[in-house]
Amino acid sequence: MRKVIGIGETVLDIIFKDNRPLEAVPGGSAFNAITSLGRCGVNASFISEAGNDHVGKYIIGFLKDNGVNTDNVATFPDSKSPVSLAFLNEKNDAEYIFYKDHPHDQLEFTYPDIQPDDIVLFGSFYAVNPVIRPQLVGLLDYARSHGAIIYYDVNFRPAHKDEVIRITPNLIENLDYADIVRGSHEDFATLYRKEDADKVYNAEISFYCRQFIYTHGSRPVEVRGGKDIKKAYPVPDTEVVSTIGAGDNFNAGFIFGMLKQGITRADLDSGLSEEQWDGLIASALAFSADCCKDIFNYVSKEFGERMKG
């Protein structure tokens, strides 16, 4: 059975509407995707650090309850769980304030068993943070040498816009490791001051990675696959309670689609067909839509049970 390994931060998301707290839920970009995949019966594991506190214990227990392997979620004596405040606007899109001590991030893990065509998911500031760069690159090298598919979600928030120059070498290296790159309109406006999918792909991505996904909220999803594939997929109208986990669950759905379709690294190297892209984006949008129906950051347990069928 193919495996999915996520690496990223753990945070406690406190969600506000009209300046009143609604819910506190475990979160983190890769965390949300891996939780959803665990709910869908995928063999999923997570590599991270959790705070040595009540929140950290809660987060590790939450992963286990959702079928995710936590052998490589480490706690350190002085570590405190990071918190993010998410304020939902009238469209239920979120603005964030992060309380996290990035300079003191730590990462210790033993390399998990990775076989050909297993999938490694990484992204966010965690993926470019210089403090944990050696450990992250070690994992990416290990994954690549073992034939894994590497999925990179850029997810670079405007809160880090003053650090773009400092992290650019790490960003470029990540693009080079990746077999699939996904990013949002906001990511690329922050990083490159470019707001057009073709301009971003041709100038910044295609030299390093052939498969590219560009998302822009409720606007169509753009995909690029070398010279052969250029397509836009409309996003279905759905009732939105929160968009906090929309992108993370898009990633989960895309990865789930790759597993369902049996897409291998060799397929990616030779280029996906339009039919394969159609199925992958449909799966990604289905996961994203289900997540947005509630205040939580993941697909519902009922959705997960249906996906197991």
Image (cartoon, helix red, strand yellow):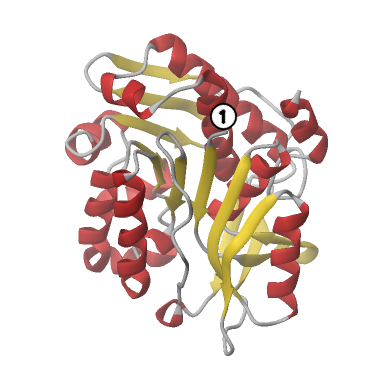
Quarter the C terminus occupies: top right
**Residue identifier under label 1:** 284
Q: Does residue 51 lie above or below 180 as drawn?
A: below
Residue 282 in percent (x, y) is at 57, 20
Q: Nearest the camera: 168 or 308?
A: 308
Report crowding for label 1: few under 14, some 14 to 19, many 20 or more residues within 10 A (C-alpha). many
Which residue is found at the position 47% from the left and 68% from the top?
Answer: 109
Q: Nearer the viewer, residue 51 or 198?
A: 51
Secondary structure under the numbered disc 1 in the rendered image: helix
Position of residue 238 measured from the top left corner of the image (x, y, whole percent)? 70, 28
- Judge left or right: residue 277 versus residue 270: right
What amino acid type should be assigned to the residue bearing mark 1?
Answer: Ala
With 102 as the anchor, is 52 left or right in this view?
A: right
| Image position of 92 (left or right of 272) | right
Give the residue displayed 57% in from the left and 62% down from the top: 96
Quarter placement of the N terminus: top right
